[in-house]
Image (spheres, rainbow, N blue to C red):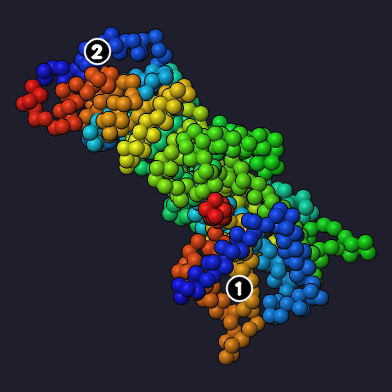
Amino acid sequence: MGETVQKPTVPEQAGAPAVESTSAGREPLLEVDHVTLRFGGVVALNDVDFTLYKGEILGLIGPNGAGKTTCFNAMTGIYQPSEGEIRFRGERITGKKKHQITKMGMARTFQNIRLFPEMTALENIQVGADAHHKTSVISALFRLPRHRREERDGIEKAERLLEFVGIPNRMHDAARNLSYGEQRRLEIARALATDPVLLCLDEPAAGFNPAEKEELLQLIRKIRDQGVTVLLIEHDMRLVMGVTDRIVVLEFGKKIAEGLPAEVREDHRVIAAYLGVPDDDVA
Amino acid sequence: MTSVRDWIDSGRHAVAERWHNAPRWMRWAVIAAVVVFFYALPNREFYQWLGPIPTTGSNFGQVLFTISIYVLLAVGLNIVVGFAGLLDLGYFGFFAVGAYTVAVLTSPSSDLKTLWPWLLALPVALVLTMISGVMLGTPTLRLRGDYLAIVTLGFAEMIRVAATSSEFLKGQRGFNQIPHPPGTHSDGSPVFGVLDPRPYYWLVLTLIILVVLGVRNLNRSRVGRAWISIREDEDAAQLMGVPTFKFKLWAFASGAFIGGLAGALFAGKQNFVSSQNLELLNSIIILAAVILGGSGNIVGAIVGGGLVAYMIERFRGIEVFGIELYEYRFMFFGLVLVIMMIFRPQGLIPNRRRAAEFKDRRKEVIVGG
């Protein structure tokens, strides 16, 4: 048993046919290729390796401190991997600027909400939409046609997205005056405004009650149905099981399992990681 | 004390609400009336009816010119500090670059002996200040908060020391006979003369209006949103696709442009520029004006700049118990700032986001009723 712990791909092999059917023939969108990330002596990510395919909802789970958010941050360009590389749409993102990665089609939300609090919901979304806009000082100063066109585009997008996430009546409210749940939704809308191919949600259900979680599930499915690939970090196992197509499990910065939700749920290492079963019992 | 504050607050809310409810034509009419008022202000026939408002110790037209320069500077600094949230303690340095460029190119005491007319030197001064803004910004805008403040403080000091000690920049002797802006009346006498400060005031006032329209356009665009998103959360802004460095540099360059404009106008009016004009205090006063008026709000910056400059000038020539109040002007000024920080830290007229909130509160009331 000790041997299989060293080889984290085993569960995938066990469920090989099923996994093949969901990922075979699909285009890889994001490849996390043997990424190691060290902060001084601390190894935050240890040889993490997984691929995200176009159109799926992938769950990234693990106990507290497992390295989920670190992994997210490496993907969005906040940290540079010490070893290995991350490819997005076939292109290396190492060394790219954060706003360039966003422009390539990767958007994210934050574990602790990070909206622009003094800006209205509309303006928050416009900032996201501006990622693909080109208006600069000259066009804005003289209100040239490009400025007008892009303003209109931003407002239309905001109306559409606020409707989509279910808070259409909050358009002109300052973000900090929105309720907690509305802020979470606004963050998703802002991320979607950048026209992402891949949307990374960092614990979007944190602090939600069961009814709100159910609504969030539906929203995530709706996002996927729009053709956006979703990477979901989540603590709540039920939520993850209910919505994801595949799951990657991290523990202490290492990938310990990967596979379909049903397989991962049965995986004893995952159970051990979550419930803290003593080593003797694992073996 | 709280009740007084509530009372003032509710009054202000009512005014803000009225303002946002008012039809567009009415708002424009109010703005037009304010503009006409300020154009009429330096005429004795007009200001003699205003009681104690005109200054007694000095020519009111001259005072208005000084105030207008401060207002222009406050509008410029508001872009950097108020919108983009970059603490710039050396803003007056850009004023110096503008004034000195004009002086070097036009004055007979300059070593260059180019003797350009003022109007020709103006665009050169503006371009040079923008370049100096970009040059200062490129290495320093990677810094945040306190560090940026210290570096910008150093920039203004460098310029002051260079102006004081460099032979080329003439130190305290300065440059004299800087030409005035061009233009003659029908009888052949120049529009911008030595005796009458009013034409200069009108010129600056007109430029303030143009600058404010420009800044307002920027603020209500992708550029303004980028600046404010940087102020609110720079990391989140980057991750939402805002090229933060580029827009911080634009904030610096735009602010520098306006500062340089103020400097060039000052040089054209004053005829004389020397290192004595370049005290560190000036940078601090403008920053105080922006904060007093309401950081991040254009109208706030105008009101702040006007009030601060007016307060300083108003004390001139007033004696209480044989003490010249002007000597204590900065003490009063400091006192006002302290009181402001206690009772109204967001400034007299806070930024536009809060205006939007009033709007929505109104909507909620309508829905609820």
Residue furthest front in the image: B369
The percent coordinates of residue A105 (x first, y second) are: 48, 26
Q: Chain of mark 2?
A: A
In the displayed structure image, the side of residue B147 where residue A13 appears, left or right: left
Q: Chain of mark 1?
A: B
The percent coordinates of residue A169 (x first, y second) are: 52, 43
Where residue B329 sits, quadrant-wise, is bottom right
Label 2, residues with CA under 10 Å away: few <14, some 14-19, many ≥20: some
Front one among A207 and B30: A207
Check disc 1 and report the residue beneath it. Answer: B312
Front one among B171 and A198: A198
In the displayed structure image, the side of residue B85 where residue B306 appears, left or right: right
Front one among B267 and B225: B225
Judge whether residue A266 can be spotted in this image.
Answer: yes
Q: Residue at x 26, y 30 (%)?
A: A237
The percent coordinates of residue B74 (x first, y second) are: 60, 59
Front one among B339 and B3: B3
Judge whether residue B151 can be spotted in this image.
Answer: no
Label 2: element kind: loop
Q: Amino acid at mark 1?
A: Ile
The percent coordinates of residue B242 (x first, y second) are: 51, 37
